Image (cartoon, rainbow, N blue to C red):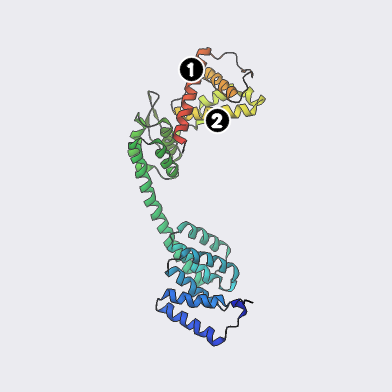
Amino acid sequence: MTENKADVVMFPKWKSSLEQKGRTALQAKKYKEALEHFEQLISFEAANSEVMTGKLICLMELGRYEEAETICRELMKEDEGNYFQYLHIYLTVLFQTSQYQELLDLLDEVFESEEIPQEVRKQFWQLYDITKKLKEDESSAEYIEDIDEFIASLDSKDAKKQWRCLSKLKKQDIHPYINELVPFLKKDYIQPVIKTAMLQWMQEQKVERNVEVTKLGETKVVNPSKLDDILSHPSSRQILNLLDPVEQDNPTLYEFIQQLLFRYMYVRFPVMPTDEETPSLAKAFFELGTSYLQLDHYPFPLENYGSQKEVDLWKQQIEYYEANYFSVLDES
C-alpha cells in the first residue's frame, strides 16, 4: 500500500523549518536550493502564498519563465485573496520575456474591469508606461529592419520575398521611405504584382504626390491617394456591368469571373483597359469562366464584343497574367 504525500501530516516544526530554509536560500540567491524547499512544502500541500511567491521568484531567476507563467495564471484563478500579488508577478514575467503587447493588453483589461488598490494601480501604470515605450521602440526597430529587408529584396529581384516583406509592412508608415521606394515603380525587373502592392501601400497611407509607374511598356503618372480600388476602377465596373445578366442568372459563374477580373486588373494596375477594349475583354472573361466551370454551352449575354480573334488574344493575356499573379503569391 502506498501513501500520497498529501496524506502524510507535516508537523509544524518541520513546516517552519522548510519555510525558513527556503527563505534563507532565496535571500542568499541560492535559487535551486530554495526551490527544492518550496517544492517539498507544495508536495505536502503545506504551501501558503509566501511559499508560492518564493517558488515563482526562483523559477524566474532560473530562467524557467514558461513554468512561472503557467503557475501564475493558475494561482490568479484559484487564490483570489492574493490575486494582485500573483498578477504583479505575472506581469513581471511578461515584461522580462518581452511579451510587451500581451502585457499592455492585459493591463488595459485590468484597468477597465478590476477594482485595483490605489498603490497597486500606481505601480501598474508605471509598468504600463515603461512597457508602452519599449513596445514603440521595438516596433520602430522591427520596422527599420523590415523595410531594409524589403529594399534589399527589391535589388535581389526575389518577388516572393518582396511579397512576404510587403505583407508585414503594409500597416506601417511608408512616408519616411517613400523617396527610396518610388524609383522601383519604374524598374522593368520589378514584378507587376509587386508594383501594385507597393501602390496599394501608398494608397492606404494616403501618399499625396505624383509617382511614375511603368507597366506593360507604358509609363503612367499617378497620385496614389487619388487612385480607385481595383474593382472600383471604371474599367472594372464597365466589364462587370456588361456581365450583369450573368450575375442574375448564375451568381457562381459571376463570382468566379469577378475573381479572375480582380487578379487580371491587379497585375495591370494602374494601366487599365480602354472603354473600347472592355466588351471583348468581358467576352474573354466569360469564356474562361464558363470553360473553367465546365459551362461551355452557357450563352454570352452580349451581341457586340468585337472579333473572336480579339477575344482569344485577351484570353491568352488573362491566363498569362493569372500565372504571373500566382507565381508571386505561391509559397511552395
In this view, 38 is above or below 330: below
Seen at 49% across and 71% down, the residue is 56
Which residue is more in the foreground, 79 or 234? 79
Query: Seen in the image, is 177 located left or right of residue 76?
Result: left
Residue 66 percent coordinates (x, y): 48, 63
Q: Secondary structure at mark 1?
A: helix
Q: Disc 2 marks which residue? A: 259
Q: CA distance from mark 2 to mark 1?
A: 20 Å
Query: Seen in the image, is 41 located left or right of residue 210?
Result: right
The N terminus sits in image quarter: bottom right
Q: Amino acid at mark 2?
A: Gln
**Is disc 2 surrounded by few (<14), some (14 to 19) or many (20+) residues within 10 Å?**
some
Q: In the rendered structure, find residue 257 and report the number of the disc placed on it.
A: none
Residue 156 visible in the current orientation: yes
Do residues under tags 2 and 1 come within 8 Å of each other at their CB atoms? no
Residue 166 lies in what quarter of the image? top left
Count up the numbered dots: 2
In this view, 287 is above or below 160: above
Residue 78 percent coordinates (x, y): 60, 69
Q: Disc 1 marks which residue? A: 313
Residue 195 percent coordinates (x, y): 41, 33
Seen at 43% across and 41% down, the residue is 164
Mark 2 or 1 closer to N-term?
2
Seen at 52% across and 16% down, the residue is 311
